[in-house]
Image (cartoon, rainbow, N blue to C red):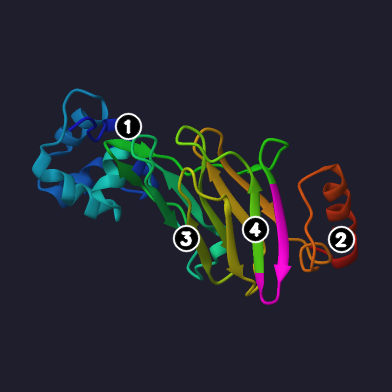
Amino acid sequence: MNQYVTGAVIKELREKNKMTQLQLAEKLGVSDKTVSKWETAKGYPDITLLEPIADAFSVSVTELISGNTVYNANVSANMMRSKFYICPVCGNVIHSMGEAVITCHGVNLRPAVAEETDENHMIFIERVEDEYFVRIDHDMTKQHYISFLAAASSDRMQIVKLYPEGDAQARFQINGVKKILFYCNRDGLFSINVVKGIDDKDRTHDDTTERRELERVADLMFGQ
């Protein structure tokens, strides 16, 4: 095991739960002096106590060990709050509807932060009947490629896996899509809002200064 629960995490969770060292000790069947030793880095809890400690704080063992506790208010499962976790070792992509503690290949993953598209990752969005046809102007070599394309609406996430030497494009059912996201294996996650009055027309717009101005005007007109 590369990581283990630290006294600082135990203390933080204990105080967050408004619990004294004695109260925690009684829940775990140890003395308050033992809890004090943990919190002052003079000892570690036995591995058999990890699950009882996690239960005492209403967190998972993974959260306890990583020190990253998750408190999601996203009970309505709004897909616009989705997170993507990408493993740098194997390229695995994990989608979550909120914050989570994700581990892959021994790496504690942090959610990817989406950036605005740029001149090296230009996106074209075209409406074709009841679908959006999305294309990324990007090479698709084995060393540098777009890994996936996704379309987010409030109640669903459509994801298309892409592969090197294939086409960086996909079709999505419109279904209230508000955002397009895609992941470059070298440069990370990118996103762009689908703008009413621009992307619902039967023509494309790339991510240029002109598009930004059109987005600004559409925002003023439609309040998005």
**3 and 2 marks in contact (CB < 8 Å):** no
Q: Amino acid at mark 3?
A: Met
Mark 2 lies on residue: 218
Q: Nearer the viewer, mark 2 or mark 4?
A: 4
Q: Magenta stretch: give its range.
A: 123-131
Q: Is residue 8 visible?
A: yes
| Residue 209 % position (x, y) | 85, 42
Q: Nearer the viewer, mark 1 or mark 3?
A: 3
Mark 4 lies on residue: 134
Mark 3 lies on residue: 97
Q: Quarter of the image holding residue 8?
A: top left
CA–CA distance between discs 1 and 3? 29 Å
Q: Nearer the viewer, mark 4 or mark 3?
A: 4
Q: Is residue 125 magenta?
A: yes
Element at badge 3? loop
Residue 58 horizontal side relative to residue 136, left or right: left
Q: Amino acid at mark 4?
A: Val
CA–CA distance between discs 4 and 3? 23 Å
2 or 1: tag closer to the N-terminus:
1
Q: Amino acid at mark 1?
A: Ala
Instruction: Write the residue at 76% across / 46% down.
Output: 207
